[in-house]
Each structure stands twice: as structure tokens, then as C-alpha cells.
Image (cartoon, rainbow, N blue to C red):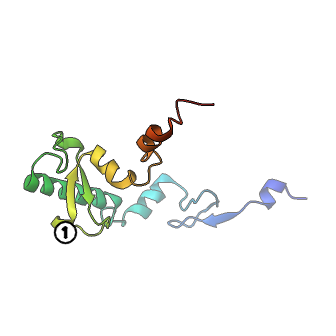
Amino acid sequence: MACYGISCRKEKPCVVCGKMILSGANKKTCSRSCANKHRAGIKYKLNSPRDKVKSYQSLKIRLLKERGNICERCGYNKYEILQVHHKNKDKLNNNPENLELICPNCHYEEHYFEKSWLKDYQKMEESDNWLFHRS
């Protein structure tokens, strides 16, 4: 009778040298040197997620130069935290007419104020005093 561990063992060949390795955890190569050889032809800079970040940064820098270093709604002047807002909420539409440089507070109001359950808080408080006078 064969050892259970050996009989159930699943192996596959290394993609570089062909040596048999255990097939687990998405392993493709048998060693670091084979992994380096396998990675040699990969171009990491093409279509990387960093391209999205760099394009957002360049968009923000362009808007800062064109429109100044303040929030376009309330005049807040810490330009480091200003955010680019798409007026029509389409992230792919980067036309200057569709973009706005606004502070995080104004940006939050734009996206979440309409959905807030606290929007009618003042009305409820005035009409009923429901929060402060419990029976």
C-alpha cells in the first residue's frame, strides 16, 4: 500500500524548466531563478492601475492651473485636498465644462445629501419635538 500523501499528491511541470512541482497556490515555477526568467518578458508599465492615478493627478493639476487653488463652490483654500467632481457623474467625461474642483465637504453634499435620512431632521424637530419629548 502506497503512502496516502504521495498517492494524492498533484504535480505539474514548472513553466520554465519542466521540473515537477506541487500544484498549489497558483504556483507556476519551481524556484526564484525560474520565476525571474518567466517574468523577464512582461511589460509592467502597460495598462497598469497607476496609469489611472497619473491621469487623475494630471487632470487635477490642469484644473488647479486653469481655475485657481480654491473650491469652486465655497472658496475653501487648501488646494491639496480639493477633489475633481464630474457634474454629470460620468467618470469618463473629462471635458472641462463637466469638471469642478471642490472641497471634500461640498463633494459629500453633492453625492450624499439627497439620500440622507437626516435631510428632514429640522422639519421633524420643529413639528413634533419627537427626539426630545418621549412619552
Q: Quadrant of residue 4?
A: bottom right
Q: Which residue is mark 1?
A: 95
Q: Residue furthest right?
A: 1
Q: How far across and down, in percent of the image, does residue 104 sit?
A: 29, 45
Q: For the C terminus, which image quadrant?
A: top right
Query: Which residue occupies the foreground of this view, 111 or 26?
Result: 111
Work out whether residue 96 or residue 43 is closer to the camera in this orientation and state it. Answer: 96
Camera-side residue: 95 or 135? 135
At a point 41% along the width and 41% down the height, the residue shown is 122
Residue 120 falls left or right of residue 66: right
Say what secondary structure mark 1 lies in.
loop
Q: Hey, what amino acid is under mark 1?
A: Asn
- Residue 91 % position (x, y): 31, 65
Q: In the rendered image of this protein, does residue 62 appear above or below residue 71?
A: below
Q: Choose between 56 and 114: the one closer to the eye.
A: 114
Q: Residue 92: which quarter of the image? A: bottom left
Residue 110 percent location from the top left of the image: 32, 54
Quadrant where the N terminus is found in the figure = bottom right
Circle 1 packing at 10 Å, graded few (<14), some (14-19), many (20+), is few
